[in-house]
Image: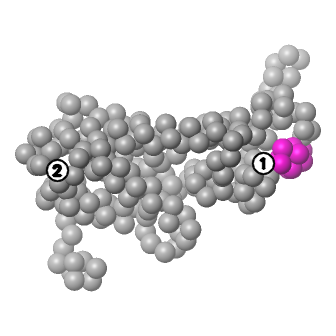
Amino acid sequence: MARRTKEEALATRHRLLDAAELLFQAQGVSQTTLQQIAQQAGATRGAIYWHFKDKADLFNAMMERVILPLEALQKAAISPFIDDPLAEIEDGMVHALTLMTTDPQVRRVFDVATHKVEYTHDMASVQQRHLDARNACVSDFEKALRLAARRNHVKLPVPGHAAAQGLHALISGLIQNWLLDPEAFDLVLTGRRTFRVYLAGLGFARPLPGTPAVNEAETVGA
């Protein structure tokens, strides 16, 4: 009986999180009440407070069920023993962008986290989570860029931290704009091309290993 009760409680928790995902995306976080989430999940308001302290706690639990693209990039630790740190970053980026285009739940949660949440006082912990993930990702990018610059004898035209911030903004901005209209452009292909263009602007002239070179026809038709 105890095991069944535990399983039922876990099932209720998942239903609440599923309901929150759908409602947050449909009408925004601030416009969604805990009562609406409970009704959508076929549960009571009391069930929400059994599992979650407040809306911010529920929101963070929803986020923890998936690995978002930029968090996936941050998890790819940059080691000084990696032969090509920029190829490592590109591979991680391609994986992250592919995840966004193929996993509906990842897409839905990222959409909520970027377009459907307001960082009000009661959502301060959500904002801090976002900042922590961004800062960790930028830190990894900076390590990779500095390491690549040393190995390729490249002098970065801007400070390493600024270059890393720009790279993060490039990838994050591509994802956010793609979410507004997924039919507008190929996220993975555009990501690969703009990544290489950005690196060229930093002084890394050669295309990364394992990526197709942009041919003359592409250049003319760009």
Relative horizontal placement of residue 12, taking residue 61 as reference (left or right): right
| Farthest residue, direction front | 121
Res 31 → quadrant? bottom right
Coloration of the structure image: one colour
| Farthest residue, direction bottom | 221
Q: CA distance from mark 2 to mark 1?
A: 47 Å
Provide residue 88's location: percent of width, then percent of height: 28, 43
Relative horizontal placement of residue 1, taking residue 13 as reference (left or right): right
Res 47 → quadrant? top right
- Residues at discs 2 and 1 in contact (Cβ within 8 Å): no
Q: Main secondary structure of the magenta part?
A: helix
Provide residue 18's location: percent of width, then percent of height: 74, 46
Specify the quadrant that holds the C terminus. Answer: bottom left
On residue 38, the disc is none
Amino acid type, callout 1 = Ala
- Neighbourhood count class around disc 1 (C-alpha, 10 Å): few under 14, some 14–19, many 20 upward: some
Residue at image location 75% in from the left, 47% down from the top: 20
Q: From the viewer's perspective, is residue 201 above or below residue 76? A: below
Residue under label 2: 156
Q: Earlier in the sequence, mark 2 or mark 1?
A: 1
What segment is highlighted magenta in the picture? 33-42
Q: From the viewer's perspective, is residue 210 above or below residue 186? A: above
On residue 19, the disc is 1
Relative horizontal placement of residue 42, taking residue 165 as reference (left or right): right
Residue at image location 72% in from the left, 56% down from the top: 28
- Neighbourhood count class around disc 2 (C-alpha, 10 Å): few under 14, some 14–19, many 20 upward: some
Residue at image location 58% in from the left, 54% down from the top: 114
Residue 164 in view? yes
Provide residue 87's location: percent of width, then percent of height: 25, 47
Q: Which residue is nearer to you in this view: 103 or 156?
A: 156
Residue at image location 66% in from the left, 52% down from the top: 117
| Farthest residue, direction top | 2
